[in-house]
Image (tube, rainbow, N blue to C red):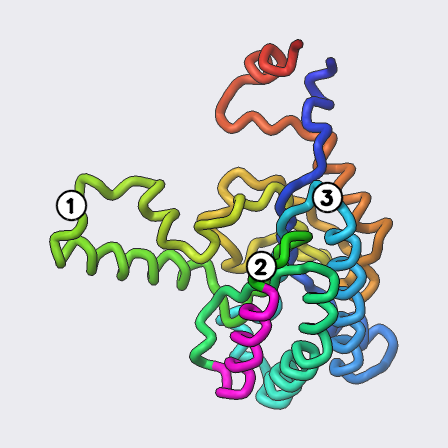
Amino acid sequence: MSVERLNLAAPRHIAIIMDGNGRWAQQRFLPRAVGHHAGVKAVRKIVELCAADPTCEVLSLFAFSSENWRRPESEVTLLMSLFLTTLQSEIDKLHKNNIRLRFIGDRTAFDEKLQQKMTEGEQKTKNNTALTLVIAANYGGRWDMTLACKIISERVASGELLPQDITERVVNQHLSLADLPEPDLFIRTGGEQRVSNFMLWQLAYTEFYFTPTLWPDFNKSALQEAITSFQSRQRRFGHTGDQIAALATP
């Protein structure tokens, strides 16, 4: 077996930064709002594709970062409205297709109606098994780790946990995705090549894939190209190539 082709399995967990909605609209001399609506259509396509693949267990989408509040107020208002209307129209469809919906991030910053809809979606789909769809909303990797540190420090202060008992496993248990596999494949559309405070802890051994394709244009062939790139890589997790080849030998 070729060392370069050891990783033949599709990724169990795909994490995506959906970048480029605004630029997609600007290239067509359209308002940025049109790009965001087109981005929602792309989300539907990718969710359907991942749900149809039995190998893919988790799809995580970075919908709104903790830094996105810095955008113009009119655009933030639009995004919040679109977020709510999308949830209202999609929750039943997700449930019908056996997809579990999960939100990570500080939802207290959202208005009460949106928070209620998020909770409703999670409760209604909590027993579904085809795919877990994670939506990161008002999320940041630093926020995630800071919150974990606060909880762990409270446990230490109460005597429930000793400082010497704090391990990577303990930290991970207090993060947003503690019960899910870490991302195998991270995709960022739109041409930027950075993680932008997304899942900083969880991406430690994730394979990165950057594409200039703007999110509204990200389709089945674009997803397959990313997965093909992933499958061509050798994931060593600190081992040597020879060790991995030996493990793969029948």
Residue 212 quadrant = bottom right
Residue at the spot of label 1: 162
Three-letter residue code for mark 1? Leu
Front residue of 217/122: it is 122
Horizontally, residue 199 falls left or right of residue 186, namely: left
Three-letter residue code for mark 2? Asn
| Disc on the earlier residue, 3 or 2 | 3
| Disc on the earlier residue, 2 or 1 | 2
Q: How crowded is mark 2: few (under 14 residues within 10 Å), some or many (20 or more)?
A: few
Residue at the spot of label 3: 54
The secondary structure type at the circle numbered 3 is: loop
Residue at the spot of label 2: 127
Horizontally, residue 17 falls left or right of residue 205, namely: right
Q: What stretch is highlighted in magenta?
A: 110-125
The structure residue drawn at horizontal position 53% and vertical position 38%, both measured from the top left corner, is 205
Magenta portion: prevailing SS class: helix
Camera-near label (3 vs 2) is 2
Residue 116 on the magenta span: yes
Residue 147 quadrant = bottom left
Q: Quadrant of the C terminus?
A: top right
The structure residue drawn at horizontal position 69% and vertical position 17%, both measured from the top left corner, is 3
